[in-house]
Image (spheres, rainbow, N blue to C red):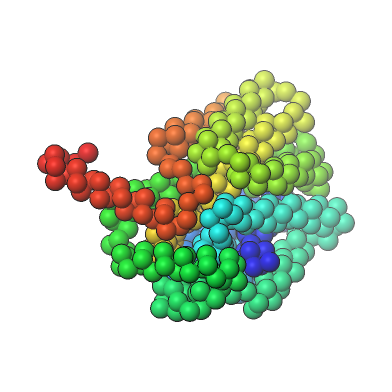
Amino acid sequence: MTVFVASIGGFLFGFDLVVIAGALPFIEQAFHLTPAMKGFAVSSAILGSMSGPLIGLWFTERVGRRMTMMLAAVFFAFSTIGTSIAGTIMTFALWRFMGGVGIGLAMMSSPIYIAELSPPNMRGVLVNINQLSNVIGINLAVMVSYVFSSKGWGWQWMFASQAVPVILLFIGLLLIPESPRWLASKNRALEAFEILSTINGDEVAKKEIGEIKSELSLETGGIRELLQSGVKRALFIGVVLMIFSQINGVNMMLLYAPTILADAGIKFGSLSILSSIPIYLLILVTTIISFRLIKRFSRRGLLITSVLCMAAGHLLMAINLFNNWNPLFTIIPMLIGAGSFTLGFAPLSWVIVSEIFPNKVRSIAFAVVCFFLYAASFVTAQIFPIVTEWFDKKFHNAGGVYLIFAGVCLLCALFSWKMVPETKGLSLERISSFWQDRQKERKFSIKSKGTIV
């Protein structure tokens, strides 16, 4: 139940980012948007998300993971009110920016919080609940968009409906405990022990507290610790993995699905939203299936397979557009790409980056990783309509965009194979010692050989 409450932040992430997909055709008409302004209407929330980790960096360390999620709920509340009454595109974008700050705060603090509470053998599954909530939020956003558009209530009601989960988040956060690992880092080991004991029993809790104290004694928790060779490598892997998670093209399919389908020839408005519903329902089903896959298969193997299947989906989309097949066929490569993404890459990117960093620098490292994630997402969301229009004007076809995305996916698969370590089944402290052991091995190699290897 604690994980469920924490994952409402993930729900709001999905809802807030995707409700714009259904509202966008109507906002485009209401405010007479150019392709650049259309991109800005979508990406303004993502721009706000970039500042979320920077704000959250201080809050997660000073006041805790739970209170940071509470702050995120406050930003969500302001955004909900503002976007539903906005009269111009600039005021709309401003309130979307506020919601984006909430997204950045929630998606920084929620996965860390869940990972720090979870037993090692359940951590991958429990962190993935955040991804499941995200996908449920995406689906409800699409359903809400369809209902309000078909009933003629207007796009404002789409954003106002976000008030319900925001209220639930506020109430739930009053009932859950703080992260035991954060408490231990603040010399509140007794409180941490009580929480861990409730989760795993006294015997396991004593062992965990001992491991946490041992690791904390070896860490300073400062930004300089991120530059140590082992942690620096983990940070590099986390940053690159999260950039790939945003520039692979599937997120653009989800953000712009009704627009993509309308451009392909499917009717405007509520019908294009209705046509996109199978895509969003599929990612709900595949996210549920991913729980079993994460528990059964290795992190790296599932990650690489997922990304290769995404590349295949993009290639099929390009072939479809180059050959001007029936507009309804456009849904098939979108299903392949979105399904593959949510079976592996989408949940595993969050699972891996939530567990590869040492305790004292986890929130700092996560803030850096999330900043690059949202920066990559902002750039991609902003330029996607512009690049698509350029391909349309230059080649009378947008298929080239998806060839680029396929190439990005292939690069991601290569990076995952070469760089991402296997972390399944290891405690957070054992994963931390893995990077420390690498650093010691490197120092020994330098001393013994006189060269860096």
At 67% from the left and 57% from the top, the residue drawn is 133
What count of labels does the image hold?
0
Residue 345 left/right relative to 269: left
The quadrant in which residue 453 appears is top left
At 67% from the left and 20% from the top, the residue drawn is 323
**Residue 39 at what x, y percent from top left?**
58, 49
**Residue 420 at what x, y percent from top left?**
43, 41
In the foreground, 179 or 136: 179
Given the current orientation, which residue lies at the most extreme left position?
450
Is residue 371 something one can see in this rendering?
Answer: no
At 34% from the left and 48% from the top, the residue drawn is 233
Given the current orientation, which residue lies at the most extreme right position?
151
The quadrant in which residue 334 appears is top right
Check the image and report above or below for 438 versus 333: below
Given the current orientation, which residue lies at the most extreme front position?
203
Q: Dividing the image into 4 quarters, which one contains the N terminus?
A: bottom right
Check the image and report above or below for 51 versus 378: below
In the foreground, 54 or 365: 365
In the foreground, 205 or 100: 205
Check the image and report above or below for 304 versus 153: above
The quadrant in which residue 167 appears is bottom right
**Residue 447 at what x, y percent from top left?**
14, 46
**Residue 231 at what x, y percent from top left?**
34, 54
In the foreground, 359 or 403: 359
Is residue 241 something one can see in this rendering?
Answer: yes
